[in-house]
Amino acid sequence: MYKLGYYTPGSSVVHKLDPRVKIAAVMLVSITVLRADAFTAVAITIFIAAVAFIARLSPAHLLRAVKPMAIFFVLIFLMHLFFTEGTPIQLFPLTTYEGLYRGALLTWRFVFLILSAAILTMTTMPSELMSGLERLLRPLRPLGIPSHDVAVMVSIVLRFVPTLLQELQQIKEAQMARGANFRNGSIQTRMKSVTALVIPLIRNSILRAEELAIGMEGRGYRRGRRTYMREPRMTHSDYAILALLVILTGLVVYQ
């Protein structure tokens, strides 16, 4: 079962693309998603579906990536559905057609932002992702931005996300075994139950961060530019795909 931040091994064309191209593609797709209207949303949906198909990622695999945010998506949709002024829907007087459109479009945007990031982490090894990000940020060094440090921090975050989710599930199961109830009761009772999850999770996060720092120091880690066992190299197909994405993004943004 897929967990957010985990790499899914494969030999597809998407897996073999240069990590810099995939990172840039996610950034360009994100810009396009945020500026998309209904017609563009359909085109991007087809594009993302085609990329997932080429990468051999099943729909169920992708749905697991957005499942943790399902409640947030529902809240966003309902807020726009009920609080946007406009023409009322006859069957549901408290809702409007404008709210239905805006809620659906905004929810779609958030879903596909997460999906595009999920496809990136599914098809790119963490080490390749770090090296690609570090190379993309190298031109910013004259501005005082440490590209390698930023890449290391992103790599650590990606590694910690599935670990924290796993720990959260373990803490939840332990608290339920002790009689905690996270599904029934008043809102105040549920909030108190959530506290039993948050405090141990924060404590474990601090302990893991301390262990990681000690481990990195014990292995002689120092800040600064480092070499990689596999140096990524852009191919003609990488340049062609990147150029195509830039052109399509420009058409959407400046239409």
Image (tube, rainbow, N blue to C red):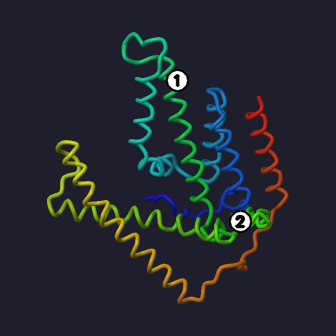
Q: Is mark 1 on a helix, strand or loop?
A: helix
Along the line of sight, which residue is nearer the eye, 220 or 97? 220
User: In the image, residue 207 lies at what x, y percent?
Assistant: 39, 76
Along the line of sight, which residue is nearer the eye, 59 or 244? 244
Q: In this view, does 198 lie to the left or right of 54?
A: left
Label 2, label 1: how far apart the Cα atoms are: 41 Å
* Nearest-to-viewer mark from 2 and 1: 2
User: In the image, residue 121 lies at what x, y percent?
Assistant: 58, 59
Residue corresponding to mark 2:
145
* Count of picture labels: 2
Q: Which residue in the rendered view is the most extreme toward the front?
A: 144
Q: Which residue in the rendered view is the most extreme toward the left?
A: 179
Residue that appears at 23% across and 65% down: 174
Residue type marked 1 = Tyr
Residue type marked 2 = Ile
Residue corresponding to mark 1:
101
The quadrant of the image that shows the N terminus is: bottom left
The quadrant of the image that shows the C terminus is: top right
Labelled pair 2, 1 in contact (Cβ < 8 Å) = no
Residue that appears at 85% across and 57% down: 236
User: Tag 1: Cα neighbours inside 10 Å, few (<14), some, or many (≥20)?
Assistant: some
